[in-house]
Amino acid sequence: MKAIPFIIIFFCVYTLQAQSPQDLKLPEPKRFIDKIEIFAGPSLSFNYGNKFIENYKDDNIESNRFVKMGYSIGVGVYHPLSDRIDFNLRLQYDQKGRKTELNTPSNPPSIRRLGIKNYNYNYLTVSLAPRISVGINKRFFISVGAYCSKIQAVKGYEKITDSEGQIFLEDTFKGRFFEDTNNDGGVYSITWIPGLQSFETYDIGGVLSIGYSLPIGENHILTIQIIDNYGLTNINKDKPYGQEEKNHNIQLLLGYTLIRKN
């Protein structure tokens, strides 16, 4: 019985000597950040929250929301959790906003007041989302996470006319106008708030995306990605006239990713 431990040790040593160096090679540890990306692309904003920024119609007033173009540009890094799951941290500059038309009664009631608004909201955004690669070749991916944005600048344009073509106002500015209507639908009160004073400093929301990656050589990847950023914060500070506005935009991003060798 005393010989058994020596037999086991001899068998283990013999087995290790019989293995090639390739067989004994340990898995290589992955980098903490194994991929770095840059990306850019256009976006469409569909802000929501009140009847002045959504498609709305009643007996007196009509509000129309138009397609609002914007863009995003930024950089990101990836931390691997497994062969198919990565944490993706991004820092980007986003232009969001809204474009609307408000049609209300004027005086006399047969004449209508038409107000066009076009606002750009510029944000610095940080997002964090796990990215899951799917499919045999892991070309497709989905991602779910959250973002936090800080307002950087605002630029507005307004044009107010009537149904007979008379122009009452046309101007660009840094700030926002807020309007309220009376029971008959006419605009009876307007508030001007300059600069960023009408904005909450931070906007928080959810991120949902799908995409496709195309390897180029051994360490380079091209990506195309559609991202839905759904804001959960009322960005109107102190809620002028009780109005709420929340950011919602969809981005189409093209990216280049560099894979860092282990």
Image (cartoon, rainbow, N blue to C red):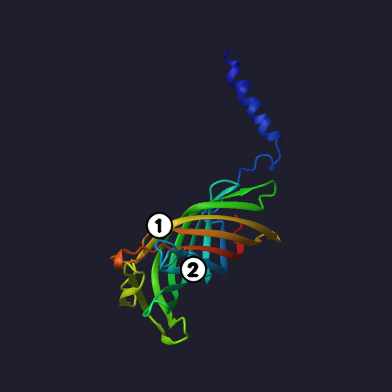
Which residue is at 30% across, 67% downward?
241
Asked which quadrant contains residue 178, the reply is bottom left
Give the SS element for disc 1.
loop
Q: Which residue is mark 1?
A: 232
Above or below for 69 versus 250: below
Q: Which mark is residue 99?
A: none
Give the SS element for disc 2.
strand
**Which image quarter is the C terminus in?**
bottom right
Kind of residue at disc 2: Arg
Kind of residue at disc 1: Leu
Q: Earlier in the sequence, mark 2 or mark 1?
A: 2
Q: In the rendering, at what x and y percent does residue 173 appear?
A: 39, 82
Q: For the residue carrying disc 1, how many other residues have a C-alpha within 10 Å: few (<14), some (14-19), or many (20+)?
A: some
Q: Which residue is mark 2?
A: 65
Which residue is at 28% across, 65% downward?
238
Q: Residues at badges 2 and 1 in contact (C-beta under 8 Å)?
A: no
The answer to whether 202 appears left or right of 250 in the picture is: left
Residue 138 visible: yes
Residue 259 visible: no
Q: For the residue carrying disc 2, how many other residues have a C-alpha within 10 Å: few (<14), some (14-19), or many (20+)?
A: many
Residue nearest the viewer, comparing 231 with 129? 231
The answer to whether 166 appears left or right of 216 in the picture is: left
As measured in the structure, the alpha-carbon distance from the residue carrying label 2 to the one carrying label 1 is: 19 Å
Which residue is at 40% across, 68% downward?
60
Asked which quadrant contains residue 260, the reply is bottom right
